Image: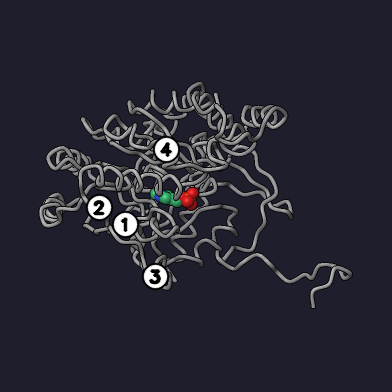
Amino acid sequence: MASNTTSPSSMPHVMNTYGRLPIALERGEGVRVWDVQGNEYLDALAGIAVSTLGHAHPRLVRAISDQAGKLIHCCNYYEVPLQEEVAKQLVWHSGMTDVFFCNSGLEANEAAIKVARKFGVNKGIEAPAIIVFDHAFHGRSMATMTATANAKVRDGFGPLVQGFIRAPLNDLQALEAIIKENRDVVAIFQEVIQGEGGVHPCDPVFLQGVRKLCDKYNLLMMVDEIQCGFGRTGKWFAWQWAEGVYPDVMTLAKGLASGVPVGAMICGPKVADIFQPGNHGTTFGGNPLAMRAALETIKVMEESRLLANALTVGAYLQNALKQAFEGVAGVVEVRGQGLMIGVELEKPCGVLLKRAALEQRLLISVTADRVIRIVPALILTQQDADDIVARLAPLVKEFLAE
Ligand SMILES: *Cc1c(COP(=O)(O)O)cnc(C)c1O
């Protein structure tokens, strides 16, 4: 059958892993995108909390173009000064110590899991265990999929990786009971605001309690800030809202380079020197192109005061959504922080609502079957926020009335 003399068939050859919506985007500018037919959309999703600066930000475009003309990749056999520059920024903003760069969220989490295991083994624990939470999402590799709570992500891919124990979120007593029962626990790993699980924030008191438990039992506090971190909540990292809390390990990806693939694991003093050469590595990770994009993203975030913007426009948007849905039967709750907002409905709304939103020329997503997720670029204006509500509220009301 295979022949190089005929033209390529028109059959799709990309594996069917996404259940895609029927539009193809061609270009964007700020929080607007256009499909191949020329239709304009308001982007309240930012490629799942990725496009921090919006689309085609002139500063980022210039930095990436300039870097592409100099050096895209050189591998980690050599010093990469741009890695040091980005690491310096991340350390400065987090108060943590050292950074490992990779290419995605799950890679950052894999690195964190390896840190936890090595930390445990160094303590003399042969089979270290990590506590993870209900509704957690940490990725789709073997280990991060095991750490993820959703059975849909895990089913059919066993045997799963050993060494994970699941706990309920925001329940310190249950957590301490698990730690006491399991002498092999070495780390507590959590999203500060769960994203894929349905936009569930951790209580700051819970985070403070986790820190205390980690100190009491000599465990690592590890936070997955891949979705909620990097300015989205109005602070650099969502854990910074909980006074006195500092994690031992933090993972970042999504928004870190405003769309160029990059991940990072950041360690505090307790484990900053746990890896020795040969213990961990990556070919692409931290390449000059990705680092230049991350560095420029950070600079623009600072110069344009995007954290403050995320805070004020986020609060404005959340408030406007609350008003729009006040007293509407079928809306359970509007929640979130900064520009990470969820609207929970009583009934599943997955595909239907995403399609209806497309007709209103609005990009959103739905997580956990019935939570509308809004995670736009941090450059969103108050006017854009009004526009989101104007497009979203009527279609949600119509959907609920059916
Ligand atoms: C998206 C996400 C990941 C996985 O990141 P990938 O880049 O898709 O591997 C992990 N944790 C959280 C909280 C995420 O939102």
Spatial CA span between label 4 and label 1: 28 Å
Mark with earlier residue (2, 1): 2
Nearest the viewer among 329 and 302 is: 302
Spatial CA span between label 2 and label 4: 33 Å
As drawn, the residue found furthest toward the bottom would be: 1
* Residue type at tag 2: Pro
Quadrant in the picture for residue 232: top left
Q: Considering the numbered disc 3 on the image, is that residue within a helix, a strand or a loop? A: loop
* Residue type at tag 4: Arg
Quadrant in the picture for residue 116: top left
Q: Which residue is mark 2?
A: 128
Spatial CA span between label 3 and label 4: 35 Å
Q: Which residue is mark 1?
A: 327
Q: Which mark is residue 94?
A: none
* Residue type at tag 1: Gly
Mark with earlier residue (3, 4): 3
Q: With 185 as the anchor, is 18 left or right in this view?
A: right
Spatial CA span between label 2 and label 1: 49 Å
Mark with earlier residue (4, 1): 4
